[in-house]
Amino acid sequence: MAACIAAIGSVLLAVGCGESPPAPPAAPAPARPAAQAAPAAQPPTVAEPETYTYNPAGRRDPFRSLIITGGKKNVEFLPPLQRREVSELKFVAVVWGNLGTYGMIEMPDGKGYAVRVGTRVGPNHGVVKRITAKDLTVLERYVDFFGETRTREVVLELRTREEGLE
């Protein structure tokens, strides 16, 4: 047993000391027949680099913000409730519950959304201010002709059964 341990120890010592086994001899290169002469050395050819030009036609500027468009309203990136003017929306229901009061708003395409106080509505940064049993009030900021920022309240009245649903 002691002889086995001594043999393993000497092998590990030899490997650990950096001794490496000898490299195998390299294979000799095959001889060419006399009929095949080595080709004449030609200078290496350099491939011309491809030139690329960027054509921005029909593409958006990658350095412009997707949200801020410099005065123009880019509604394609807004949530559905902020894409339409407040005057285009219909207030169709009020929902009371343990989680608070919600108003149901119908879009022109017939889709409905639940809103509560603080929900943003309309492209002019309108915010739902109040929900009552008869109406929903949206506070909307806008810039008038003189460049002054003003606020207005848009009141959406609840549609009753007597008025009929369209």
Image: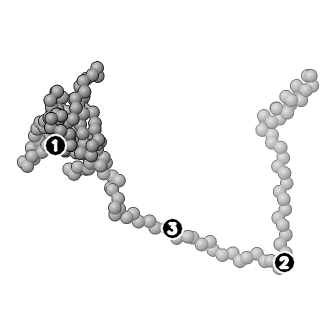
For the C terminus, the quadrant is top left
Query: Is residue 29 placed above or below 76 in the rendered structure?
Result: below
Query: Is residue 115 placed above or below 44 in the rendered structure?
Result: above
Cα separation, mark 1 vs mark 3, equals 59 Å
Element type where label 1 sits in the image = helix
Instruction: Write the residue at 23% across / 36% down.
Output: 105
Give the amino acid at mark 3.
Pro
Q: Which residue is mark 3?
A: 49
Labels 3 and 2 touching (C-beta < 8 A): no
Q: Which residue is mark 1?
A: 87
In which quadrant of the rendered view does residue 154 lie? top left
* Image x and y of residue 97, in percent: 27, 22
Tell which of 124 and 60 is nearer to you.
124
In which quadrant of the rendered view does residue 2 lie? top right
Q: Which residue is mark 2?
A: 34
Looking at marks 1 and 3 on the same chain, the residue that comes earlier in the sequence is marked by: 3
Give the amino acid at mark 1.
Ser
* Image x and y of residue 140, in percent: 15, 38
Evaluate whether residue 125 shows in this view. Answer: no
Cα separation, mark 3 vs mark 2, equals 40 Å
Looking at marks 2 and 1 on the same chain, the residue that comes earlier in the sequence is marked by: 2
Evaluate whether residue 162 shows in this view. Answer: yes
Give the amino acid at mark 2.
Ala
Judge left or right: residue 12 versus residue 92. Answer: right
* Image x and y of residue 159, in percent: 17, 35
* Mark toward the viewer: 1 or 3: 1
Tell which of 87 and 109 is nearer to you.
109
Element type where label 3 sits in the image = loop
